[in-house]
Amino acid sequence: MKNFIFALLLVLIHAISTEAAVVHLKSGGQVKAIKVWREKGMVVVLLNHESITSFSTNEINLRKTFPHRKKAAKPAAPSTTSAPARPANDVAAKPVVNPPPDKAGKKISLPKISTKLPEREPPKVGEGGAIRKQKKEMEQRLNE
């Protein structure tokens, strides 16, 4: 019984976590997708992890596919009448912060890093790599 409940919870969590986007076509059809977005006048649809397709905006019902979302409410502007006026030279308004002193008055310096990369010699044509050497050895064994 515990295993059944555990399996049921896993299925529900998976179903909730995979929100599928639905693309509503003007012809009445629907396309289920993982993700939908607009790009350069086209609607791009990620069908699964490997396939992406795009539709022109003439083929898709944009109002159903991209529903209007309410914008977040703007914070109310602070009213000037409720706050008491402060004088311009009020010291308490701006606290003075002293920077922490350096250790024994020394400046911190970073080591210089050379920007030039070490140069490598290109491989010589005559020597070849390990694979070429192995091929040469195999050819010599076959010729014997």
Image: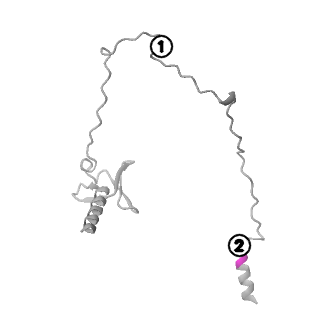
Q: Magenta part of the protein: which range?
A: 129-134
The structure residue drawn at horizontal position 76% and vertical position 59%, both measured from the top left corner, is 121
Front residue (pair 106, 123): 106
Dividing the picture into quarters, in which one does residue 112 lie? Answer: top right
Quadrant where the N terminus lies? Answer: bottom left
Q: Relative to 77, is 50 on the left or the right?
A: right
Which is nearer the eye, 102 or 15? Answer: 102
Indicate yes or no whether the magenta region holds residue 132: yes
Q: Residue at x 30, y 62 (%)?
A: 10
Amino acid tagged 1: Val
Q: Secondary structure at mark 2?
A: helix
123 relative to 39, above or below = below
Which residue is label 2 attached to? 130
Which is closer to the viewer, label 2 or label 1? 1
Percent across and percent down for residue 49 are: 39, 61
Residue type, label 2: Ala
Q: Give how far across and how far down residue 24 sits, in percent.
A: 25, 54
Task: Kindly identify which numbered label has been placed on residue 91.
Answer: 1
Image x and y of residue 25, in percent: 25, 56
